[in-house]
Image: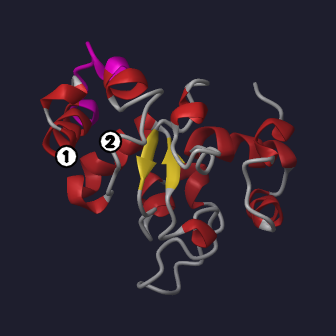
């Protein structure tokens, strides 16, 4: 398990307090950062993050229902009182609409449920060097429906050179 300090330098100012309040523990913050992925690396891509296998898919705008769609601990804190803001009260709320590096497996879950267009990605800014290295390479040999959907979404968005 990675320590909370490992990802604390990835948080935007003030975000640590939001995450702390939403999860109730420093360990919870680290777990959410690790599972959902850190924000962009210094070069504005997910390449550095993905070298650790964390946060490999670059989304150009985190959807307003990302945490509540993924569910479980990601939906913790959801107020469920504003249909136009499904992630209100969650870890995702302050990150909605912002570029973010998300987990390749959570990407697969989300697009399986919501469709390819619901989660815009940047192919060149994803993966260790490109989306082929660290995302599609890890999807190879997997046959689950959500992974098949993710591979299809990436092929349509990034072309066959992505290796999905």
Residue assigned mark 1? 157
Give the Cα distance between marks 2 and 1: 8 Å
For residue 13, side relative to residue 54 (left or right): right
What residue sits 51% from the left and 59% below the top? 67
- The disc at residue 118 is none
Q: Is residue 153 magenta?
A: no
Q: Position of residue 95 (x, y in %)?
A: 58, 66
Is label 2 in contact with label 1 (beta carbons under 8 Å)?
Answer: yes
- Out of 99 and 115, give the one closest to the viewer: 99
Q: Is residue 111 above or below residue 98?
A: above
Residue assigned mark 2? 123
Tell me the magenta residue range. 137-147
Q: In which quadrant is the C terminus drawn? A: top left
Q: Position of residue 70 (x, y in %)?
A: 45, 52
Q: Is residue 139 magenta?
A: yes
Q: Position of residue 76 (x, y in %)?
A: 63, 61
Q: Residue furthest top?
A: 141
Using the rendered image of the protein, determine whether residue 115 is visible from the camera's viewpoint: no
What residue sits 80% from the left and 36% below the top? 6
Q: Earlier in the sequence, mark 2 or mark 1?
A: 2
Using the rendered image of the protein, determine whether residue 85 is visible from the camera's viewpoint: yes
Q: Is residue 37 above or below residue 141?
A: below
- Out of 120 and 73, give the one closest to the viewer: 120
Q: In which quadrant is the N terminus drawn? A: top right
What residue sits 67% from the left and 45% below the top? 33
């Amino acid at each position: 398990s990675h320590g909370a300090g490992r990802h604390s330098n990835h948080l935007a100012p003030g975000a640590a307090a939001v995450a702390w309040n939403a999860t109730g523990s420093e360990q919870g913050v680290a777990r959410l950062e690790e599972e959902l992925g850190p924000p962009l690396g210094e070069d504005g891509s997910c390449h550095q993050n993905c070298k650790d296998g964390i946060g490999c898919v670059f989304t150009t705008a985190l959807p307003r229902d990302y945490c509540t769609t993924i569910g479980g601990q990601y939906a913790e804190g959801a107020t469920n009182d504003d249909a136009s803001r499904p992630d209100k009260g969650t870890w995702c709320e302050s990150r909605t609409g912002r570029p973010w590096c998300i987990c390749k497996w959570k990407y697969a879950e989300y697009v399986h449920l919501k469709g390819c267009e619901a989660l815009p990605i940047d192919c060149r800014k994803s993966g260790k060097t490109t989306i082929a290295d660290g995302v599609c390479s890890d999807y190879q040999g997997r046959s689950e429906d959500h992974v098949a959907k993710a591979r299809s979404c990436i092929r349509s968005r990034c072309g066959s050179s992505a290796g999905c």
